[in-house]
Amino acid sequence: MLGWFAYLWLKPGPAPYHYQLVEEGGVGKFDKLGLEAWPDLTISKHEVRVQEVDKPIAVAHLATRGNAPPVLLNWENLTSEPVVSIDSNLSELTALATAIATHVPKDAVVLAWWDTSRQVRLLAGRDTLFTSHLGEPMIAPSHWRGRGDTIKKYEQEFWGAVWPAEERWKFQIFADALAADANEGVAMLRELAGPREAYLVVHVADIYKLGLMRPERLDMAYKDFPNNGNVHGMIGQLKAWMKDNHYEAYTLQFFSEKAMRAYFLRDDKSGNTLLAQMLPFTNSTPLEPQAVELIYKHGGYRVYKIQPAQPSGG
């Protein structure tokens, strides 16, 4: 599919792709998705297509409740490079939502990347700091970068997105907090959350998104490896690639039975960011328990309770 990148680079026009509705219906029509616990949802399957290419470049499942705008539940890229969104594992998301609905108080607030926030709000029924489809960062091949404005416009129209200025401003602070060192970052998250009990949800793929937004703080890369059951052989390949390319740490994302993605950090500066310390990188160290408490982990997700600020001595 490399040819379509060059084609789209040379061809003028608006958004270089479009969402095509393939199927729509109740949860029962999509029984393989494992959404039986949410029978009130309407599910739609969309293919992401580009002109002059026969096959879709990605497949997405969306959910709606009533007349609310759609929420992305699952995304599968069918190219070698992420397009628009990151590959995800829906079974991990539903397990996360069930755990949050069970263990997080109803009057608490959940902080997470805007896409995870919308999923948590929909499936777990908890209040989240971010409620809008903010569309940041833009995940696109280099050949599409010149069409950033048209892509953002198309995404906003498709998702029925409203981008309140205050919410966008808070999301930038959220990204700054994750890219800061641990103590400073936690303090920034506390201030964002306000006086309510607060929880933070992170996912290993957030490191890629944060790297796109804050490249001066995070020097990172990713590489996909086949998941063929030979774990020792795969880890050997992974470590060899990491050494050859001068990276210092890695973590893994298993997004299908056949593939896994490794995310790499190059230096201590990247590894010392709050987000890197919260994820299972090979060089991460446990955070101070008086700052955050790990209360849940499953697959690529980690949920932390943000501890109240400690009174200063005097």
Image: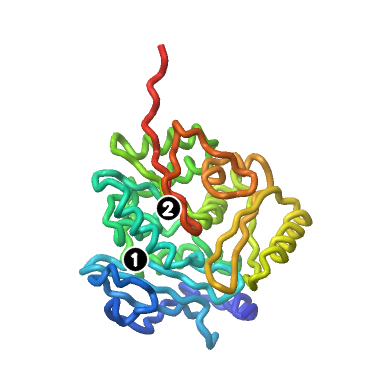
Question: Can you give x and y, in whole percent of width and height, for residue 44 in the image?
Answer: 34, 77
How busy is the neighbourhood of tag 1: few (under 14 within 10 Å), some, or many (20 plus)? many
Colour style of the rendered protein structure = rainbow
Rendered image quadrant of residue 273: top right
Q: Is residue 132 left or right of residue 137?
A: left
Residue denoted by label 1:
71
Q: Which mark is residue 9?
A: none
Quadrant in the picture for the N terminus: bottom right
Between residue 147 and residue 25, name the one nearer to us. Answer: 25
What residue is shown at x 27% (from left), y 46% (from top)? 105
Position of residue 71 relative to residue 136, above or below, is: below
Quadrant in the picture for the C terminus: top left
SS state under label 2: loop
What residue is shown at x 76% (from left), y 59% (from top)? 240
Give the mark nearer the N terminus: 1 vs 2.
1
Question: Can you give x and y, in whole percent of width and height, for residue 197 in the image?
Answer: 31, 39
SS state under label 1: strand
Question: Can you give x and y, in whole percent of width and height, for residue 128 in the image?
Answer: 32, 50
Tell me which amino acid carries mark 2.
Answer: Trp
Q: Is residue 1 left or right of residue 126?
A: right
What residue is shown at x 74% (from left), y 60% (from top)? 241
How busy is the neighbourhood of tag 2: few (under 14 within 10 Å), some, or many (20 plus)? many
Tell me which amino acid carries mark 1.
Answer: Val
Rendered image quadrant of residue 34: bottom left
Question: Can you give x and y, in whole percent of width and height, for residue 155 in the image?
Answer: 40, 67
| Residue situated furthest right in the rendering | 244
Residue denoted by label 2:
113
Gap between marks 1 and 2, in whole Å? 14 Å
Between residue 239 and residue 3, name the one nearer to us. Answer: 239
